[in-house]
Structure formats: C-alpha cells, structure tokens
C-alpha cells in the first residue's frame, strides 16, 4: 500500500468517526428535554440526575468511589448523597464485609425516576425511536450499548492507578 493509499484510508476512517461524533452530538440534544422533564417532575438538579444514573450503573459503592467517578471532592459527594437520600432516590447501607464502610445504593424509587416511561415515551426522542422499524430500533440499541460499554471500559482504564517503572 502506498502512502497515498494509506492517507486515503486514514482520511476515510477519520471522516466516519467525525460523522459518527456529529450524529451523536445531535442525538444528545434530543435527550436534553427528557432530562429537563425529569428535573421538573422530581425537583432535582441535572447533575444530581447524572449522579443517580452513574450510581445505578455502578451498583453499591462507597461515597469515595462516587466522588472519584464524578471527579468531585468527597464533601461535595456527601451533599449530593444527602439530597438524593432526602428524595428517597438512594439509601445508605452498611457493607456486608466491613461494617465501617457505608455504601450508597439506588432505591426502586430512584430507578423509577430515571426510567420514567411516560416522560420517555412522550419525548421527541421517544417518539422518533418508536417510529423506527423494529430492526432499526434493535440496531440502535445494540450500537448504543456497545458505545456505553466501550466508554466504561476506557473510563475504568483511565481511572486505574499506574505504577511507575521500578516500583513494585
């Protein structure tokens, strides 16, 4: 393969990536009204809803882990947890393995708030997805799930501590 051929292949791949990113960003705009409706319905900030979604994905975690993932100080995470607990979206529970550790768990009420079917179905994004043929809905779900899995894998790798060479 010549340098020109390699440049063409690279440019085509970059073009596909750019197109996918632009489409993704346009699709994200469709989700904003859904988040605002959830905000109005449940009286929590968008950041709180984001944290609740992350907690749902993480499962039971200590405050320190939530703070790490959100990249916020532990004191800020504690205030966030207090607000979510006040709304009964999360619950503090003692660790089964270490009683000194308190874990944060999303409650059923918190899960239902995030997955409010009525808001989702009435949204522009919900109506647009419902209008797609079933095979395209399935393909969209598969691609988005792959995107989320890849982003999580890369985020985990970025959060893993690196050990300098020569230190065991």
Image: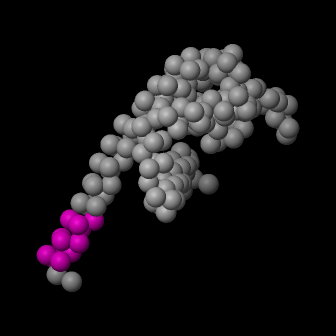
- Toward the bottom, the furthest residue is 1
Answer above or below: position of 107 versus 161.
above
| Left or right of 164 in this view: 115 | right
Q: Which of 140 and 77 is in front in this view?
A: 140
Q: What's the coloring here? A: one colour
Q: Residue 32 placed where, x, y %?
A: 42, 32
Q: Is residue 38 visible?
A: yes
Q: In which quarter of the image is the N terminus?
A: bottom left
Chain part drawn in magenta:
3-13
- Toward the left, the furthest residue is 4
Q: Residue 162 placed where, x, y %?
A: 53, 50
Answer above or below: position of 143 versus 46.
below
Residue drawn at x 32%, y 49% as measured from the top left: 23
Which SS does the magenta portion mostly show? helix
Total labels drawn: 0
Answer above or below: position of 39 versus 24.
above
| Left or right of 71 in this view: 3 | left
Q: Residue 76 placed where, x, y %?
A: 57, 20
Examine the image and state in which quarter residue 108 appears.
top right
5 drawn magenta? yes
Q: Is residue 76 visible?
A: no
Residue drawn at x 44%, y 54% as measured from the top left: 132
Residue drawn at x 52%, y 19% as measured from the top left: 40
Q: Residue 19 placed where, x, y %?
A: 27, 55
Answer above or below: position of 75 versus 1.
above
Q: Nearer the viewer, residue 10 or 39?
A: 39
Q: Which of 25 and 112 is in front in this view?
A: 112
Residue drawn at x 42%, y 45% as measured from the top left: 128
Q: Nearer the viewer, residue 33 or 23?
A: 33
């Amino acid at each position: 393969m010549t340098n020109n051929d390699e440049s063409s292949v690279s440019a085509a791949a970059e073009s596909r990536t750019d197109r996918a990113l632009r489409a993704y960003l346009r699709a994200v705009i469709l989700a904003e009204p859904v988040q605002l409706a959830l905000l109005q319905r449940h009286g929590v900030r968008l950041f709180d809803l984001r944290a609740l979604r992350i907690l749902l994905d993480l499962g039971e975690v200590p405050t320190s882990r939530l703070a790490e993932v959100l990249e916020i100080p532990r004191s800020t995470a504690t205030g966030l947890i207090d607000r979510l607990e006040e709304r009964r979206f999360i619950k503090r529970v003692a660790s089964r393995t270490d009683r000194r550790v308190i874990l944060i768990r999303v409650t059923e009420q918190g899960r239902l708030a995030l997955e409010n079917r009525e808001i989702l179905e009435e949204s522009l994004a919900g109506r647009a997805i419902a209008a797609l043929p079933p095979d395209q809905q399935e393909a969209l779900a598969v691609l988005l799930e792959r995107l989320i899995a890849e982003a999580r894998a890369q985020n985990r790798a970025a959060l893993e501590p690196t050990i300098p060479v020569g230190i065991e």
